[in-house]
Image (cartoon, rainbow, N blue to C red):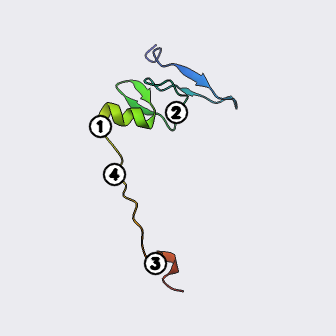
Amino acid sequence: MPHEHVQLAQAPNGEIGPRCHACGIRLTFGSAMVHNQHYYCWEHYVEQTGADTVTVVGETEVKFYMKNQ
């Protein structure tokens, strides 16, 4: 099987998901990041790839939904 190397874990609610290849933390398939056929948590994915988020959170004086009030 092509994914026999992936270690799975089961959450208390019965949901299964992969474990991080680096630290072993239990993940969901939705939160796991894949790199070179291994699943990683976000911190170890960034460490492995050097990629990081490009989202910049900015603060504004007036919220867009408050402008018309």
Q: Where in the figure is residue 5, as x and y percent of width and height?
A: 45, 15
Q: Residue at x 40, y 32 (%)?
A: 44
Residue 40 found in image quarter: top left
**For the residues marked 4 and 3, what is the alpha-carbon distance in whole angstroms?**
24 Å
**For the residues marked 2 and 4, what is the alpha-carbon distance in whole angstroms?**
22 Å
What's the amino acid at mark 2? Phe
Are the two marked residues, 4 and 1, in contact with CB atoms closer than 8 angstroms? Answer: no
**For the residues marked 3 and 2, what is the alpha-carbon distance in whole angstroms?**
38 Å
Any mark on residue 26, and which?
Answer: none
Q: Secondary structure at mark 3?
A: loop
**For the residues marked 1 and 3, what is the alpha-carbon distance in whole angstroms?**
35 Å
Mark 1 or 3, nearer chain start: 1
Residue that badge 2 annotates: 29
Any mark on residue 54, and which?
Answer: 4
What's the amino acid at mark 3? Val
Residue 26 found in image quarter: top right
Residue that badge 1 annotates: 50
